[in-house]
Amino acid sequence: MKITEEQVRYVADLANLRLTPEEVSRMARDMESILGHIDKLNELDTTGVPAMAQVLFDAEETATLRADVEKATLPNEAALENAPQPGGGFFKVPKVIER
């Protein structure tokens, strides 16, 4: 599958990434290579191979999922008790994404 630099720039924009022209070229090549490997895997005959939604679930006892049990939550006041800058019942944090 051919990946264009325009597609790479589009995906980078969705992910809020700023790529140099060299990085865009390299990513296009890398993504094309990765998708080529996936195409090879798609050529394999998997007839008779059972689907595996959770690979480790049956293989290892320690990898089992815990029961989904409802329990009381931490009160808002207690959660904010040690916050460096609480505000309006929320945690105040520095802005990390600018558009």
Image (tube, rainbow, N blue to C red):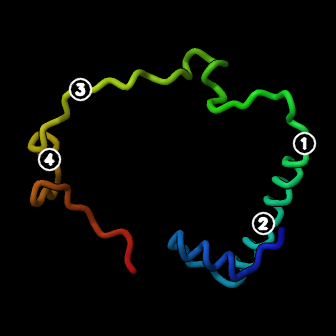
Residue at image mark 1: 44
User: Callout 4 environment at 10 Å: few (<14), some (14 to 19), or many (20+)?
Assistant: some
Q: Callout 3, which amino acid?
A: Lys
First in residue order: circle 3 vs circle 2 = 2
Residue at (13% x, 44% y) in the render: 76
Mark 4 and mark 1 in contact? Answer it, CB < 8 Å. no
Residue at image mark 2: 30
First in residue order: circle 3 vs circle 1 = 1
User: In this picture, is 37 found above or below 98?
Assistant: above
Mark 2 and mark 4 in contact? Answer it, CB < 8 Å. no
Tag shown at residue 80: 4
Pinpoint residue 17: horizontal percent, then vertical percent. 55, 73
Q: Callout 2, which amino acid?
A: Asp
Pinpoint residue 72: horizontal percent, then vertical percent. 19, 29
Quarter of the image where one finds residue 7: bottom right
Q: CA distance from mark 2 to mark 4?
A: 45 Å
Q: Nearer the viewer, mark 3 or mark 1?
A: 1
Residue at (67% x, 19% y) in the render: 59
Pinpoint residue 18: horizontal percent, then vertical percent. 56, 78
Q: CA distance from mark 3 to mark 2?
A: 46 Å
First in residue order: circle 1 vs circle 2 = 2
User: In this picture, is 56 found above or below 74?
Assistant: above
Q: Secondary structure at mark 2?
A: helix
User: In this picture, is 68 found above or below 20?
Assistant: above
Q: CA distance from mark 3 to mark 1?
A: 46 Å
- Left or right, 42 with reference to 78: right
First in residue order: circle 4 vs circle 3 = 3
Residue at (59% x, 73% y) in the render: 12
Residue at image mark 3: 71
Q: CA distance from mark 4 to mark 1?
A: 53 Å
Q: Callout 4, which amino acid?
A: Leu
User: In this picture, is 67 found above or below 23?
Assistant: above
